[in-house]
Amino acid sequence: MIRSVVRGIGTALPARVMKNTDFEGIVETSDEWITQRTGIRQRYIANESETTVSLGEAAARKALDNAGLTPADIDLIVLATSTPNNTFPASAVEIQQRLGMLHGFAFDMQAVCSGFVYAVVTADLYLRGGQAKRALVIGAETFSRIVDWTDRTTSVLFGDGAGAIILEAAEGEGTRDDRGIIASSLRSDGSHREKLYVDGGPSTTGTVGKLRMEGREVFKHAVGMITDVVEDVFVKSGLGPDDLDWFVPHQANKRIIDASAKKLGIDENKVVITVNLHGNTSAASVPLALGEAVGDGRIKKGDVVMLEAMGGGFTWGAVLLRW
Ligand code: ACO
């Protein structure tokens, strides 16, 4: 039985850190408001030369180093992003080119903050379907480019960055101790469009547009949607909250993360939190959080890890894997 196993991980952040206090003078806000309502203390903001492609490439190269592989070993790149360098070609193909890959195939995947979870599920299907042997799955974003810097209700929430993992098709015994992806669940519902969207696009305004969000409305739906997909994955896998070693949620707001973990019965010591460091980096948030917890030795080979995310669309989803 083929399983998609994680071979390596890498992350990349812009050079510039923006602290909460750096917003004072830009919009009417305070470090206290941002910290209390969101848990965010700082975020990284790309400079002109740092782009979704350059951050994604940097994360991909680190993941390759971490796995002891080279671009020649990869035959699929799936890039989750809502902030591509250009409308087309896909930023994934630009990353493929920068890595010197003249073989294999690459494409972008757009599911906003759920993008990385969608990309992992998609790459897993390609690997198990025999279409590819090793996939680079990247989440990379430069949300600072689509944030309205005059809007305090959104500008303080987002940051830029990238994370990547390498998934490899590996033959397993088919037991519950096998490493790799165990189960997943994806959902979307377009009736929530107006609560979180970008007010521009190639086919409507011909502009890039800015992010618009009714934060309170998003908040109201987030916990229920997240817990639904995580519970679906528990049912599919036959595992439960006590079997988890780590819960790695999308990093939008600490209050949403805490409430979701509590409702799911997941011990707070198993929850990986990086929203304080990175803000909401959309599709990059889950791989950035994974990178942090693998880097500091919390997540180890063989650990059972639940990933989840929820975002614009709405889209939401969860993936359970043995690291
Ligand atoms: N500084 C100071 N005051 C502010 C700020 C700010 N940066 N932003 C809003 N306020 C004010 C509001 O104007 C409001 O004032 P009022 O009561 O006089 O009208 C007050 O603070 C409270 O505003 P709320 O919106 O009710 O605050 P809330 O506690 O809901 O927190 C937040 C807002 C942080 C946005 C929260 O609703 C949230 O996290 N929502 C979910 C966002 C999310 O998870 N997005 C995920 C998907 S993102 C993606 O897919 C791209």
Image (tube, helix red, strand yellow):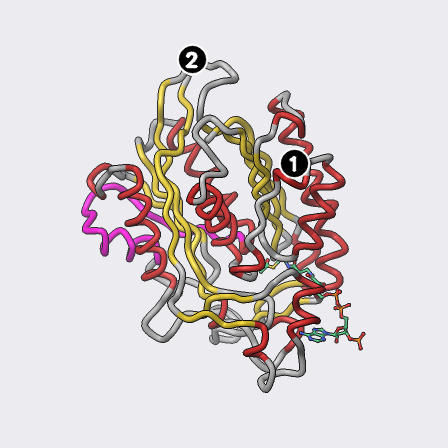
Q: Residues within 10 Å of mark 2 (few under 14, many from 20)?
A: few
Identified at 28% across, 49% down, the residue is 61
| Ligand 1 - quadrant of the structure image | bottom right
Residues shaded magenta: 91-111
Is residue 222 one of those drawn in magenta? Answer: no
Identified at 40% across, 52% down, the residue is 108
Q: Which residue is mark 1?
A: 230
Identified at 42% across, 13% down, the residue is 173
Badge 1 element: helix
Spot occupied by residue 279 in the image (x, y as percentages of width and height): 56, 62
Tell which of 205 and 290 is nearer to you: 290
Question: Left of 105 or right of it: where is 299?
Answer: right
Spot occupied by residue 285 in the image (x, y as percentages of width and height): 51, 53
Position above or below: 2 against 11: above
Position above or below: 224 against 25: above
Identified by mark 1, the residue type is Val
Identified by mark 2, the residue type is Glu
Determine the image quadrant of residue 56.
Answer: bottom left
Identified at 67% across, 41% down, the residue is 268
Spot occupied by residue 208 in the image (x, y as percentages of width and height): 48, 73
Q: Which residue is mark 2?
A: 173
Position above or below: 317 against 276: above
Between marks 1 and 2, how big is the CA–CA gap?
25 Å
Q: Residues within 10 Å of mark 1 (few under 14, many from 20)?
A: many
